[in-house]
Image (cartoon, rainbow, N blue to C red):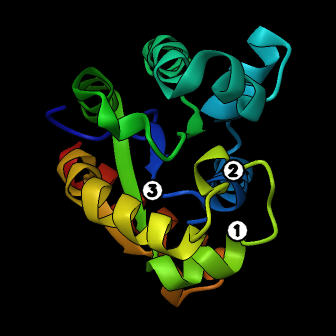
Amino acid sequence: MTGVKEDTHIFLVGLMGSGKTTVGRQLAKRLERPFLDSDHEIEARTGVRVPTIFEIEGEAGFRRREAQVIAELTRQDTPVVLATGGGAVLDAENRRLLRENGWVVYLNVPPSLLWERTRHDRNRPLLQVEDPLARLEALYAARNPLYRESAHFVAEGGNFPPSALCQLLLKEFAKTCVLSM
């Protein structure tokens, strides 16, 4: 992507619990554009919840479905705000599509805070293990470089309430649009 324009998609990446959906909804409302969540799109298309897909098809099956949805959603004509699944960046093609077709924001949140946010959520298949905090730390270590590679902007998501983070992103998005036009 050579420049960001006002009609550019905004794609949010980060680990589960980083605030992609919460902040994404606020951004979409403020920018008056549709909000999409890749996991919700997968559920709508399959008619089953993500944990069920993991149970039946395994993570590999889910990732194939995720790649199909990311490919479609990143190429829409209407600018959207898209919250991706936490593992969307594992696929090199997903990273390329996100980076080339929109403004990618990495919501970087420390694993300890992610654990606080997700510890009671039973809809997180990757956290259904004996030590969910250790799993989050391992996921962070593995994915942090991929999120950074994909991102045009890194937001320290753990430092702000969602409304303040939304304000920061709107400011950065506007600055990027002005600079590239």
Secondary structure type for disc 1: helix
Q: Nearer the viewer, mark 2 or mark 3?
A: 2
Above or below: residue 137 compared with residue 50: below
Q: Give the residue pinned by disc 3.
A: 14
Q: Which mark is residue 178?
A: none
Q: Nearer the viewer, residue 79 or 74?
A: 74
Q: Earlier in the sequence, mark 1 or mark 2?
A: 1
* Horizontal arrangement in the rendering, residue 172 relative to residue 70 (left or right): left
Mark 1 burial class by Cα count in 10 Å: few <14, some 14-19, many 20+: some
Residue topped by disc 2: 124
Residue toward you, 66 or 80:
66
- Number of marks drawn: 3
Examine the rendering and report whether any part of residue 77 can be seen: no
> As rendered, which of 146 and 73 lies closer to the eye?
146
Distance CA(mark 2)–CA(mark 3): 14 Å
Residue that mark 1 sits on: 118
Could you tell me how far apart the alpha carbons at marks 3 and 1 are, in whole angstroms? 14 Å
Q: Between disc 3 and disc 1, whose residue precedes?
A: 3
116 with respect to 2 (left or right):
right
Compared across the picture, whether 39 is left or right of 176 comes to right
Identify the residue shown where x is 80% and y is 61%. 121
The residue lying toward the viewer, choosing from 93 and 87, is 87
Circles 1, 2 touching at the beta carbon (< 8 Å)? yes
Quarter of the rendering occupied by the N terminus: top left
